[in-house]
Image (tube, rainbow, N blue to C red):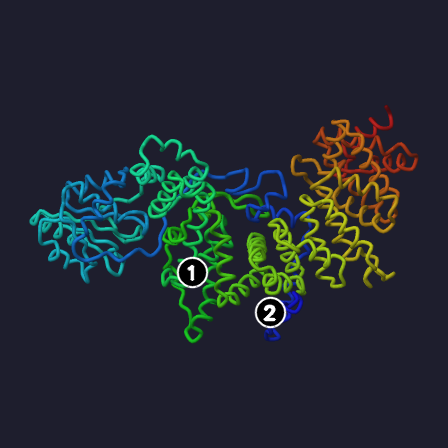
Amino acid sequence: MSQGEAAADAPKPAEEQPAPDGDRKKQEDEAEEQPRQEAWAARRDLIAHGPDFVSTLVGRDQFGQTGGTHYGDQHFHFGGRSKAPAPLSGPVPHTEIEGLKGVFRSCDSFDEALGRLRDDRLVILSGGHETGRRSAALMLLHRLGAEPIRSLDPPASFAALADEVDSSAGYVLCDLVVSRNRPLREAQLLALREQLERTRARLVITVEPSAALGDLSSVRWEPPPAEDMLHAHVTPATGEDVWPGLVGLPAVKEFLTRQHRPDEIRQFALQVVAHHRGEIDEARLAAWGETAVATQVARWLTAEKPVLRDKAFLVSLAVFDKAPYAVTAELADSLFVRLHEIQDPGVRPSIPVFGSSREERLRLAHADGYVTAEATEWGPLEGRFCAAFRDERTARMLLEEVWNLHPSARPALAEWIRKLTDDRRPLVRTRVASAAALLATADLSSAMAHLIEPWADSRKPHAWLTAANALTMAQLLRVPTVSRILHDWCTGDVESRRWTAIRAYGLLGPVHHEETLAALVDAMHRPPSAEADDPENEEVPEEARQLADALELLLLAVRKPVLAALAELLPADRVVRPHALLAFRQACRQAKGDESDRPPVLDWYARAAAAEDAAVTRHLIEFWNALLTDRAHNPQALGILRGWVRGADDDPESESALASLLGALVTTPTNRRRVSHLLTTVRDSRGARSPAAVRLSRRLFLD
């Protein structure tokens, strides 16, 4: 089946579903109200809000935790959480205690809990599942000689515990549920402690960190460092002498940079021992980490726990990894509703408005929370709480697993992703595109049919932009045939797909500028559309603007090689010339550069002149001469120069750059008259003659 045929069979995008007349009219009006986003602004959004691999587009800092600029220094690290084995009733096997003795390592929270248990005979240990809290509880009792050790089932009522601790032993009660509806009161603890003293017993209770303990005393369990735990598991089998060499292996060092559950550390220790014995090579040792992530992802999606709403949160976090937690949680609920309609269509889904604990959700996802700045169109907003998987491979593997191995979830996931294209937040739209790109790496034809082609064929320009972003990121991820798709669309007959491909080429230019420029030139030479051929159409056709936008991005992002190529085509190719001039004019219109407060083209000229780069300065002057002598561009070009002069009133560096640029332009009589008239008529905001214009006139015409 071809991609086009697959697109025809795919579910229609959410925005194209039939709607009542009033709703449809409202949707169309909202779509028309959204302004056309300039290419340079779209590029900034893609860089600011895209995932890590988009950083290959630029060589500068990015806002946020993963870029070169970091805002805020407050971090919160939470443990992992998933389903743990239910505690047993009756005696804990002696072999389990003996096994723990050889590998368990103390830490600050263990020492604190040990002191409490010694003094009070009772301690509440608060920690997440799979953080080693049960092992810690058993070792607490063992260290104090409270044996035999017995495991208790959670009682129907807390008062019934007093009847269970009826002998001189050590007791462990795991996963006690304490909530506002089932509180634990101080009087109950005092009565239980009195019974423990009477029977000379000791008791360790483990609870979730979210347990409603109020003012009751507890110890927060934090496991020992991963290196200490790995050392404890490895050295009994290898000896201490070889430990420095083993811990220095690249695969081991990489493993220790991430946070892992104690059981994962135990399993990795077995691999390290196997490597030491020559049973596996270092490549297999390094690959174990990815296998562990894949196992965790499969368990999340296939096990009874977590529940469906938490599974939806995990998928949402995979799309919005390293984004604000509130956005992830908000949009996860809309995915949950769609998944629930498939799983149980006869029951209306229930979402507890205040029922989710942020800490528990991050622990479930093996994710960290941290406070940083969020990049917005108004600048960075500090104090945003973001969430990120501890292992960066999790997001990609989770999306691929849902898309390829759980096809029943695919319609809900595809509809959710398509609907998010209408979100007005650039972060959301960009992450939606990155999710489509990741799904394209897993199954290109399905991602094209369900997501990218419907966006490109939509009547909404912002959907075209999402398709362009998705193809851009898919190309960065080296998805096969994306280059072919872009070239076919760029030179094809479908206007919306041409727009999409042209914008994608503009975004890809910094990485593949030669291929991009060649494709854009091919697109310029295709037969013009009816809009472009209309003699009464005085405005620049939309497609011509998009081609100019793409060239503008290439010029500003790549600069010298693109400038040289366009300068060569400028006098020789009559088809390319108008697009190149429009692109250069738009580039000059940009108000601020990435590295300077000067406009980027003026800054470019100033740096080239200072570096005595004769080729760049010559090409820039050639383009300016072409703008000034072209009747279609002359008024706007003079307007740009007028704005630059006003901006130089309080900027000596801009004034110096302008003096050099204008000095190179006034070598012909016509340009001399133009510049002289321009400097005579430039006025500042108060209506007085611009101070920079006065100084430039003296410098250019009186020296």
Give the residue furthest to the left.
198
Q: Using residue 423 as the reference point, say whether residue 141 is left or right of it.
A: left
Q: Using residue 427 as the reference point, say whether residue 687 is left or right of it.
A: right
Label 2 packing within 10 angstroms: few (<14), some (14-19), many (20+): some
The residue tagged 2 is 10
* Residue 71 sits above or below residue 545 on the image: above
Which amino acid lies under the numbered mark 2 shown in the image of this protein? Answer: Ala
* Residue 120 sits above or below residue 494 on the image: above
- Give whichever of 240, 607 is nearer the camera: 240
Q: Position of residue 343 (x, y in %)?
A: 44, 70
Q: Using residue 137 as the reference point, say whether residue 233 is left or right of it.
A: right
> Which mark, by number, is residue 301?
1
Residues at marks 2 and 1, CA–CA distance in whole angstroms: 24 Å
Q: Position of residue 613 (x, y in %)?
A: 77, 29
Label 1 packing within 10 angstroms: few (<14), some (14-19), many (20+): many
Q: What residue is drawn where x is 39% and y is 52%? A: 358
Q: What residue is drawn where x is 14% and y is 59%? A: 160
Q: Position of residue 24 (x, y in %)?
A: 62, 71
Cβ atoms at labels 2 and 1 below 8 Å apart:
no
Which amino acid lies under the numbered mark 1 shown in the image of this protein? Answer: Leu
- Give whichever of 550, 107 is nearer the camera: 107
